[in-house]
Image (tube, grey):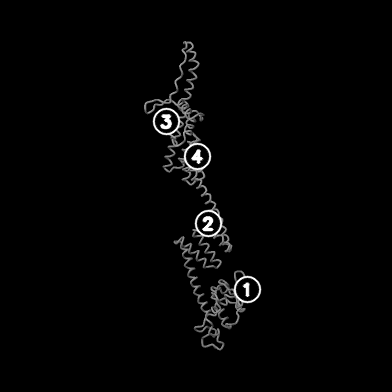
Amino acid sequence: MSRIENRLFLKTYEGETDDVRVGRIEKQVFGSPAEGSLHQRLERIEGAVAPQENPDGTVSGMRPKPAPQAVQTPVEQSSSSRQNYQPDDQSSGLERAQLAVQAAREERINRLLDEGVKLWRAKQGNQAIEKFEGVLRLDPGNAQANFSMGIIYESAGNFIEAQSCYKRAQEQSPGNKDYADAVAAISHKVSDKTNKQDKQGKLRILAEDANAAYGRGEFVSALGLYKQMDQLVPNQALVKYNIGTCYMAVKNPVDALEYYKQARKLKPNEPRYATACEKLEANLSAARKKREEAESAWAQPPQKEWQDKSHKKKAGVDSLALTQGQRDPMAMIGLIGRTSKQGVEITAVGLASRAARVGLINGDIIKAVDGKIVKSVDQINKILLKTDFQSPVQMTVQRGANMGQVSF
């Protein structure tokens, strides 16, 4: 069988089953596969293929000799020759012509296959595909051409087209293990790429919505959207940084610092991540120190009233000024604040202080004390100095868009 394949196709298909190989030969010789046992089909092929000399000197492929015929008279012989010779001669000539056409076609197919492989090895994928497409125009059922095209498409990242080529090759040669393995492998790649594309589309939508929410000042919504992105892509430094920025917008610097640190760890060479961490760490350290001072001041019982009512103004000294060793009145009630455009912003609240017991928190804005509008820490301290430590203090406080009063 290999000898016949070499003669017709210039190569063998030893990796395939005998039935598939014989069917291919019959298709080339007779136009379609024949019926019968494998032995009968091979004998029929041997009878149709022209004689060929084997390496051992024998000749195979000869047609069986015709059976002896009865002796005929010259007239009968001439008549028989006229009746039988011409059709037989025409049949043999037609068969030889068909074989010659098939051989030329196979030669061209093999040449195109070889050229395609060479072009592919020379990294000329598009030109190689043109050669393999030429093979398929001559032989639409050529599994090798489809398989080779699948390799080229796969290397270019076109997994869908590669999958189609591999499947056609497998259908044309179902017994070939390489084709079956290629179909299984490319199917996984197609599935992974589809999932990745779906994931990228979802990320793009989340990013657009989060950016829009942040631009509208909807910081809590933006934070939730960025956290969804963080679940999909947990190692993206920019997503971590944006989460930290959202936490800063909702006045949660502790969590903001945690995400800034994660962003810096993922991209240590990015200046803005390092700067954000350093500045926020410094601010939190200063705030922590003030809070500790306030808590320490609240823990110590007052040694005297805030103001010595008998104290009189001395030369160049305001009677309301704090004497050496006297404590900050705001700290005495458990508050640390700073002057801002809106009023006095609370930056720290003592854990067990009077201010904590009435619910004041970091970020609240003190607008007035005892009915007097205040715009600085000094103004609050002067008002508190005029009151007894044990007396209640009334404050007007703004929290976000809401305004309220507390008394403690």
Label 2 is placed on what type of residue? Answer: Leu
Q: Residues within 10 Å of mark 4 (few under 14, many from 20)?
A: many
Q: Nearer the viewer, residue 77 or 177?
A: 177
The residue where tag 3 is placed is 3
Q: For numbered disc 3, what is the local secondary structure?
A: helix
Position of 59 relative to 73 (above/below):
below
Label 4 is placed on what type of residue? Answer: Gln
The residue where tag 2 is placed is 232
> From this viewpoint, is residue 22 visible?
yes
Real-space Cα separation, disc 4 to disc 1, in angstroms: 77 Å
Q: Quadrant of the C terminus?
A: bottom right
Label 1 is placed on what type of residue? Answer: Gly
Mark 4 or 2 closer to N-term? 4
Q: Quadrant of the N terminus?
A: top left
Q: Nearer the viewer, mark 1 or mark 2?
A: 2
Residue under the point 53% across and 56% down? 232
Mark 2 or 3 closer to N-term? 3
